[in-house]
Amino acid sequence: LIAGSDNGVLQLYDVNRMGSTISDRAHQTDPATYTFEEFEQLTSVHVNSTDEYFLTSGNTKHVALYDIVSGKRLQTYEDLHEGHINVVKFAHYSPFIFATSSFDHEIKMWDLRQRPLHSCYTTSSTRGNVMVCFSPDDRYLLSSAVDNE
């Protein structure tokens, strides 16, 4: 389980090693949590389909890619949007495809295999976008904007 907070803290919890009660946790010798490098003003965390990587976004124009196994931040992709990125979501079946939504009125889709990273699809609404997600089969993007489009 990966959890993040608006102060930027990102933690991985190994629920299989966590004690079931508070007293169990107090006597643990092997920590069941790992703390990643912080991401400022965090608003969104999402793990890819192979459980190898996760992405973060926040009240910035940037997205960060983390390696779950090594615990390292691999890359920060800067200025992906003109406004802050509300939500970042990986596709259900492709571990390299993700989408972003922003108050800059745009929804974008990206492929981590592209160098340099650039959007492979962009669409706009008349107002800021609050969220985006993939349909269960990854054929469609669902978004919600402030204007309810």
Image: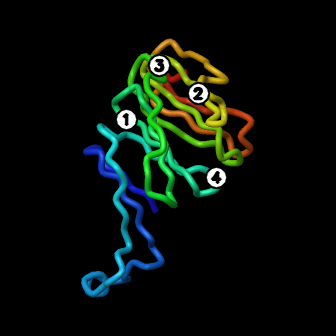
Q: Give the CA distance from mark 4 to mark 1.
A: 21 Å
Q: Give the mark, 2 or 4, whose residue is nearer the N terminus.
A: 4
**Tag on residue 49?**
4
Q: Give the CA distance from mark 4 to mark 3.
A: 31 Å
| In contact (CB < 8 Å): disc 4 and disc 3 | no
| In contact (CB < 8 Å): disc 2 and disc 3 | no
The crowding category of the residue bearing disc 4, from other C-alpha atoms within 10 Å (few below 14, some 14 to 19, many at least 20), is some
Q: Amino acid at mark 2?
A: Leu
Element carrying mark 2: loop
Look at mark 1 in the image and give the residue it sits on. Answer: 58
The crowding category of the residue bearing disc 1, from other C-alpha atoms within 10 Å (few below 14, some 14 to 19, many at least 20), is many
Q: Nearer the viewer, residue 56 or 128?
A: 56
- Residue 128: x percent and y percent? 44, 20
Look at mark 3 in the image and give the residue it sits on. Answer: 147
In the picture, measured across the screen, residue 30 lies left or right of residue 22, that is right
- In the rendered image, the residue lying farthest to the top is 126
Between marks 3 and 1 in the image, the one whose residue lies nearer the viewer:
1
